[in-house]
Image: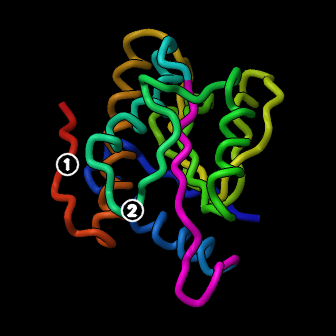
Amino acid sequence: MSTYLWMDAKNETAPAMLAMRLKQLMKDCRSHFRLSAHAPRPVVLLCIGTPAIPGDRLGPEVGSLLTQYQPANLQHIFGTLDAPVHALNLRATLTTIKKQFHHPVILVVDAALGNEFQDGFLAIKKGALRPGSGLGKRLPSIGDIQITGVFCNLYGNEATNKMHMYSQCIANGILELFSEESSSINCRFIVE
């Protein structure tokens, strides 16, 4: 069983730390079920959330940021502000992913409810995410690696500000990771 790595999203080194941790976890996932000696598993980014709720908008915001600078090794992004993945279409999205990809490494980004001590942190873990569990929803577990931004409250200006901070941190970390593999990306999202 894997444990969470917690990181303060306000820390300026958080994107680099996220990229390093993701690199380790992806190496584990890709080598565990390698398709062949020369064909690593494809990577799918699944960004879960509802744009209508400020905190829950985290996944689609990350998906939208990353589609602007789609790295060569991250060509499969599900869940953006224009086409969100949420409780109503999650099962259909999972079916699509299973049909399109042979044993992909699925990296999941979602918001999570937590307590006041977890609020403001990102949690990274190897293993499936149970979306909606904080709200009592019964949705399928999904993914190989999960990144969650933790909120005490998903509504209001504070949640909106945290969502922007989290989404920029996560997008920058993922871009840094995939930019190492594909040096054609030279950008960073700026935290204002």
**Location of residue 136 with respect to 181 vertically, above or below:** above
In the depicted view, which residue is nearer to us: 5 or 170? 170
Can residue 117 be seen? no
Residue marked by disc 2: 19
Would residue 85 appear left or right of 68 to someone viewing this image?
right
Quadrant where the N terminus sits is bottom right
Residue at coordinates 18% horizontally, 30% vertically from top-left? 192
In the depicted view, which residue is nearer to us: 29 or 76? 76
Separation of residues labelled 1 and 2 (CA atoms): 13 Å
The disc at residue 104 is none
Percent of width and height locating residue 32: 68, 78
Q: Residues within 10 Å of mark 1 (few under 14, many from 20)?
A: some
Percent of width and height locating residue 26: 54, 69
Q: Is residue 48 magenta?
A: yes
**Location of residue 172 with respect to 159 vertically, above or below:** below
Q: Residues within 10 Å of mark 2 (few under 14, many from 20)?
A: many
- Residues at circles 1 and 2 in contact by the CB criterion of under 8 Å: no
Of all residues, the one furthest to the front in this rendering is 99
Q: Which residue type carries mark 1?
A: Arg
Can residue 55 be seen? yes
Residue marked by disc 1: 188
What's drawn in magenta, residue-wise?
A: 33-49
Disc with the residue nearer the chain's start (1 vs 2): 2
Residue at coordinates 65% horizontally, 79% vertically from top-left? 35
Would residue 161 appear left or right of 45 to someone viewing this image?
left
Would residue 3 appear left or right of 121 to someone viewing this image?
right
**Quadrant position of residue 137:** top right
Secondary structure under badge 1? loop
Secondary structure under badge 2? helix
